[in-house]
Amino acid sequence: MSLTETVSEIDHLSEEQRDCIENCNAAAQVCEWCADECLGSEDMEECARLCRDVADITSLHARFMARDSDYSSQLAEACADACEDCADECESHDADHCQTCADVLRDCAETCRNMA
């Protein structure tokens, strides 16, 4: 069963929440990839650091939404802020992985902001 199929089975979620969970999971994955690609380059240390932070906070936010946590909305705002900061950093680099990451993070920030 795919992640989308699994998320669709959680009956307490709205369509907007489902989209946010999917965007958060995509952000976590792309950030792990981007951070790994940035390792070893002194110019990319901040990008890697921010990507790792975002990978952690987006995966946590997705889990909070899935279990209908009372803290999900507060975490959504922090998640949106982190995604926006990381997207800004990624956009400052020419690497394809950074540009891809920034695009995914903009989508995630928007859906998280709607959850806040």
Image (cartoon, grey):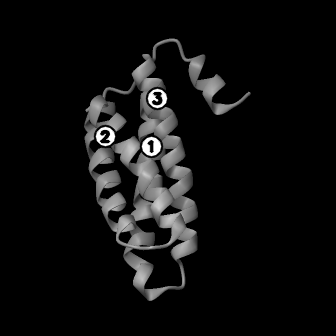
Q: Nearer the viewer, mark 2 or mark 3?
A: 3
What secondary structure is found at the residue carrying circle 1?
Answer: helix
Mark 2 residue type? Leu
Residue at far bottom of view: 42
> Is residue 68 found left or right of 36 in the rendered image?
left
Residue 73: assigned label: none
Q: Is residue 2 above or below residue 38?
A: above
Question: Label 1 vs label 3: CA separation?
Answer: 15 Å
> Is residue 101 found left or right of 92 in the rendered image?
right
Which is more N-terminal, label 3 or label 1? 3
What secondary structure is found at the residue carrying circle 3?
Answer: helix
Residue 67 visible to an observer of this rendering:
no
Residue 100 location, x and y as percent? 50, 57
Mark 1 residue type? Leu
Mark 3 nearby-residue class (10 Å; few <14, some 14–19, many ≥20): some
x 48%, y 49%: residue: 27
Mark 3 residue type? Asp
Q: Which residue is mark 3?
A: 19
Which is more N-terminal, label 1 or label 2? 1
Question: Label 2 vs label 3: CA separation?
Answer: 16 Å
Residue 77 visible to an observer of this rendering:
yes
Q: Which residue is mark 1?
A: 60
**Between 89 and 81, the one nearer to me in the picture:** 89
Quarter placement of the N terminus? top right
Residues at badges 2 and 1 in contact (C-beta under 8 Å)? yes
Question: Label 2 vs label 1: CA separation?
Answer: 9 Å
What secondary structure is found at the residue carrying circle 2?
Answer: helix
Q: Which residue is mark 2?
A: 75
Q: Is residue 115 above or below residue 83?
A: above
x 54%, y 85%: residue: 40
